[in-house]
Image (cartoon, rainbow, N blue to C red):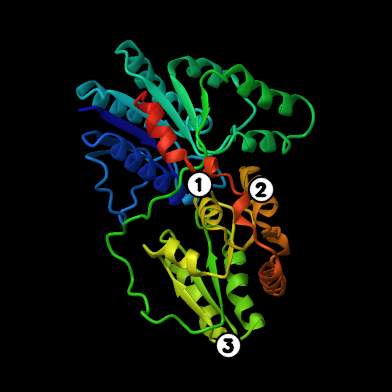
Amino acid sequence: MPRVAFYFTHYQCLGHTTRVLSLVAALKAQKRHVTCDCFWGSLEQPYLDLKAFENIHVLPYPLFSRDNFRSGSIRPAGAVQARAAFLLKALQKKTPDIFITEYFPIGRRDCYEELLPSLMYLARQGVPVYASAGYPVLDGQDMAWRTRVLPLFKRIFIHSPEQEMRQMAQTYPPGPARDAYRAFFKDHADKICFTGYVVPKPLVFKETEKEARQFIKGVVKVLVTRGAGAYHQDVFLNAIRAGDILGRNFVLTAVAGPTTTDAEWQLFNKAVVAGRVKNVQLIRSTPRFEELLKKADVCVSPAPYNTSVMLLKHGKRAVIIPMQGEGRVVLSEQPMRARMLKAVLGSVVLLPAEAAPEKIAQAVKKALKAPLNNSVVPQTWLRGNGVFAHEVFGL
């Protein structure tokens, strides 16, 4: 019975968690008797049902949270050493047959020191180590640490089409940065496998708020999702306020996300109550997100990985407002993905600075008029789940 262990971290968003759980499901579909453990490197997400994992080991001193997304991880004295020792001891006590790191070493430089002792131990034990990353984004321009650690990895799975790598290269200015990016993928082509997108499996929540059985009636259904780790509250607020401008023929279902703070939830509710038309229903979290997306005529969203994949899967019209980073974090991933959604699905793209209520309402109406041809989405783009499981087990 093969035993697989995942190591992953997150900023309290659901994107990375969803992708890991989808990969666990793919492994278990490929081999019925596989067991999957998790080394959880961030704050816990107690609202999620995580029974897909046989064992969950929560590392001490979580380095990442939504509070330090902008400023970087907070490292109390001795935290890295304590986390490294915890991880190594657990792996020595029960060594897995396969070890998978999520996003590292494509990103997460902060995790290098805590992972290195365990990666070296696993190498001595002959345990294959794989990397799993949703997209070909190299955090920072320092390649030296990646060069040191990459020999310890058997394969690097990037869960997107290879076209994303070529598009991402264009987001770098011509010169050394772009050359270094391209060189990384060229130099390690023998280890890198572009699987196509991982189609997200529905998350299971321990408890969810009661949703109205009968949604507000309207001719045009608009799904508004916050996505992107639940940031950009101003954009989400403006999308709610666009309901008044769109009028009674439109009904908006706005999903704030389970990481929404109580203060944010009160702010969003005030915006809904203040609306004159009363055509907005606000939901904090829902296990039926994909169902809502399928039924929507237009989606208003940033360009996070999982929502974008579902837009491609179901061929939906959309207004995309890509997150571009905050503070020290500069993201090229979402703008790149927004351009792809515009090219493939005809999505309307707004920058966050442009996303006033009036502009969002205009964009929704424009998206409704745009021709939609979802037949141009190559099916190979949506086979990441199966390709990953097949490659991990060497089938």
Residue 341, disc: none
Residue 115 higher or lower than 36, as above or below? above
Q: Quarter-wise, where is residue 378 in the image?
A: top right
Q: Which residue is mark 3?
A: 277
Label 3 or label 2, whichever lies nearer to me, is 2
Q: Which residue is mark 2?
A: 340
Q: CA distance from mark 3 to mark 2?
A: 34 Å
Left or right side of 210 for 267: right
- Give the farthest residue toward the right: 174
Q: Which residue is mark 1?
A: 68
Residue 24 higher or lower than 369, as above or below? above
Question: Which residue type carries mark 3?
Answer: Val
Closer to the chain start, of discs 3 and 2, is: 3
Q: Nearer the viewer, residue 327 or 132?
A: 132
Q: Nearer the viewer, residue 134 or 329?
A: 134
Question: Which residue type carries mark 1?
Answer: Asn
Q: CA distance from mark 1 to mark 2?
A: 29 Å
Instruction: Give x and y (percent) for residue 373.
Output: 64, 57
Q: Is residue 99 visible?
A: yes
Instruction: Give x and y (percent) for residue 167.
Output: 69, 38
